[in-house]
Amino acid sequence: MTGTVTDELARAVRDHAGRLAASLVSMLGDFSAAEDLVQDAVETALHRWPIDGIPDRPDAWLFTVARRRGLDQLRRQQNYRQKLAQLTWPTPPPPDERLRLIFTCCHPALAKQAQIALTLRVVCGLTTAQIAAAFVVPETTVARRITRAKTKITNAAIPYRIPPDAEIPERLNEILAVIYLLFNEGYLSSTAERAHSRDLVDDAEWLTAMLAGLLPNEPEVAGLLALIRLHRARTSARFTADGQLVLLEHQDRARWDRAAIDDAIRLLTKAARRHHQPGPYQLQAAIAACHAEATSWADTDWAQIVVLYDVLLAVQPSPVTRLHRAIAVKYAHGRQQAFAELEKLEEALDRYPLFHATKAQLLREFDRLEEAKEADARALELTHNPAQQDLLQERLASGVRDGLGGR
């Protein structure tokens, strides 16, 4: 298959698979059957497009094949056949259908990993192999997660619908949490096979942008989109050519995408002015914006960042947020105060590598070198990310003072 055909099919799947599945689910009332029809159509395209050429309307082609397969499979079910035959393409305005699809995939009754796998499969149109590659797990594992999720949806009679208005904020939080998890895994992988995955970051941004289009009045959706785009704007400076992690302090800021940063900050500002309800994603985006706007590490507005972390802790307290606040406190108020904050987190973050790396950095600055080595060794023991491992090993060997942080 040529690259052009592959790229066009990937684009068509990404742009339309969710709509295709949603249109079929809405008429069939069978989540699994609709998703399988879309996957069948994609597999058919993989075989036919290199021979027949790319159709003028790839989305219509995929829909026609999916509908035809559905008619073949449901020939003996007259009611379904009648409904299926009534479908047309393009369907009526589909936003609600895609939204219903996302809410179903991210239903709180499903395990988080199952939510992610099902969302990537059904909404993004990724194959089981692609999802397995993205998370560096066996295909069988992903297949089991998807199967269990579908079974759960069927057995628990999880409705294919947008929840009532009163439930949307809580359910939307679940969706945003899934996307945020997806983004984090792509931004800095938790596995040993690679340091990061641009594809997962792309998927997270695409999902959030789609949600922002469907739910334009939800400030936290805009906040998450701004957060992802602010981090993406710094992508080219985060790693060296040979894959070594470059900490924020040492990144070449001339390589940051300033136009993307400005766009993300405008998006964030617009959401804040309209709603005046800063949630955790808007606040994290505001912190990222402080870093992005600084012309140098020394010019960073650490006092403002500490204030933003204080607000973030008020709306979403977490030990990890306290750790990041402690790092900001170091630069705003001094290392003694930062270390005092850090010591309060010892028990809660004992298995979190960034905690030990940050502790090591401070201990080294206090010339408590043996304790610093022990903390670095503990961080190295806990992290599986190859870029972080390289950085820690170098630090243990040379005694340099850099930490692992610096989002």
Image (tube, helix red, strand yellow):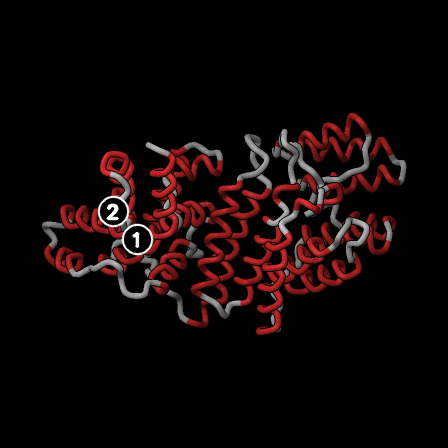
Q: In the image, is 92 to the left or to the right of 246?
A: left
Q: Secondary structure at mark 1?
A: helix
The amino acid beneath tag 1 is Ala
Q: Secondary structure at mark 2?
A: helix
Label 1 to label 2, Cα distance in Å? 8 Å
Q: Position of residue 360 (x, y in %)?
A: 79, 38
Residue at figure coordinates x 63%, y 29% from the top left: 242
The residue that label 1 is drawn on is: 21
Count neighbours of disc 2 (C-alpha within 10 A) and say few if under 14, some if 14 to 19, many if 20 or more: many
Instruction: Decide which of 222, 263 is in the foreground and name it.
Output: 263
Total numbered labels placed on residues in the image: 2
**Side of 59 where 287 appears, left or right:** right
Q: Quadrant of residue 186?
A: top right
**Can you identify the residue that label 2 sits on?**
37
Q: How many residues crowd mark 1 within 10 Å: few (<14), some (14–19), many (20+)? A: many
Asked if the residue under mark 2 is in contact with the one under mark 1, i.e. CB atoms within 8 Å, the reply is yes
* Residue 39 in sight from this viewpoint: yes
Q: Nearer the viewer, residue 61 or 113?
A: 61
Instruction: Name the amino acid type tagged 2.
Output: Leu
Residue 316 in the image, given as x and y percentages of width and height? 63, 60
Kindly give the residue lying farthest to the top in the view shown: 397
Residue located at (10% from left, 56% from top): 78
